[in-house]
Image: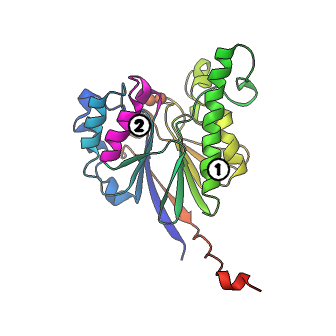
Amino acid sequence: MVERLRIAAIGDLHCGKESSGVIARALAGVSEAADVLLLCGDLTDYGTLEEAKILAREVAGIRIPILGVLGNHDFESDKAEEVTSILADAGVRILDGGTFMHRDVGFAGIKGFCGGFGRGTLGHWGEPVLKRFVQEAIDEELKLETALARLHMVPTRVVLMHYSPVRATVIGEPEEIHAFLGCSRLEEPLARNAVAAVFHGHAHRGTPEGKTHARGTPVYNVAWPLTRRLAPERPAYRVIEIDVVPPEEDVPVASLAH
Ligand SMILES: [Fe+2]
Ligand SMILES: [Fe+2]
């Protein structure tokens, strides 16, 4: 029988002073509905320690593993490290090019960055400040490439990020800001590596589902403002079930000695 893993995902909680009780209510039932919870960035509104502590309390009752990535809002107060450690103490593993294994599924997480899509992708050319801007997207792409390489023996892999790797899931946002919502550079590791699903946030007015160009990998925009607007009667988080391919058994050393 094929094993299945239920993945709950939500982005853009934007936890602030008014969020006490609100986020816990939005995430109610997730421990029963899913096997793992992904938080796709913009966990806090201004990236303050106070907001991080509120969020830590809001997720305290969740009994399944929680993985997260930071979003642009989590950097606003220049306290990203402290925010990460407050959340880590509450059991939220923040991935920044890191990986995590749960029930034979490998997870890789990055923040990602912007820079535009397809032919409009901003090039690494011109003024030094522009090159530094583009370099951030290249660095995030490399973090994902490395994380997926680390999981190369794991057949079933899932990626979470904050920015979008494809244009399809930002459609619905004003076209003038598409370039600030994600970057095709983030899709390149997803073209070279088979992945079961990709989850992101950031595009509050985007489109809930799309696919990568190279492999047709499903991409889910799980920004809370989007799911809340499109399906107010449904849970705040999306639950996606994936098939889990068990990793191949290690080849016994004895069988190699001939
Ligand atoms: Fe956001
Ligand atoms: Fe964002």
Picture quadrant of residue 156: bottom right
Residue 159: percent from left, percent from top: 56, 48
Ligand 1 occupies quarter: top left
In this picture, which residue range is highlighted in magenta?
A: 71-90
Residue at image location 32% in from the left, 57% down from the top: 31
Picture quadrant of residue 14: top left
Amino acid type shown at disc 1: Thr
Q: Quadrant of the C terminus?
A: bottom right
Residue furthest top in the image: 127
Relative side of 189 to 48, left or right: right
Q: Nearer the viewer, residue 27 or 71?
A: 71
Residue position marked by numbered label 2 in the rendering: 224
Residue 109: percent from left, percent from top: 52, 45
Residue position marked by numbered label 1 in the rendering: 217
| 63 drawn magenta | no
Q: Is residue 43 visible?
A: no
Residue 193: percent from left, percent from top: 68, 52
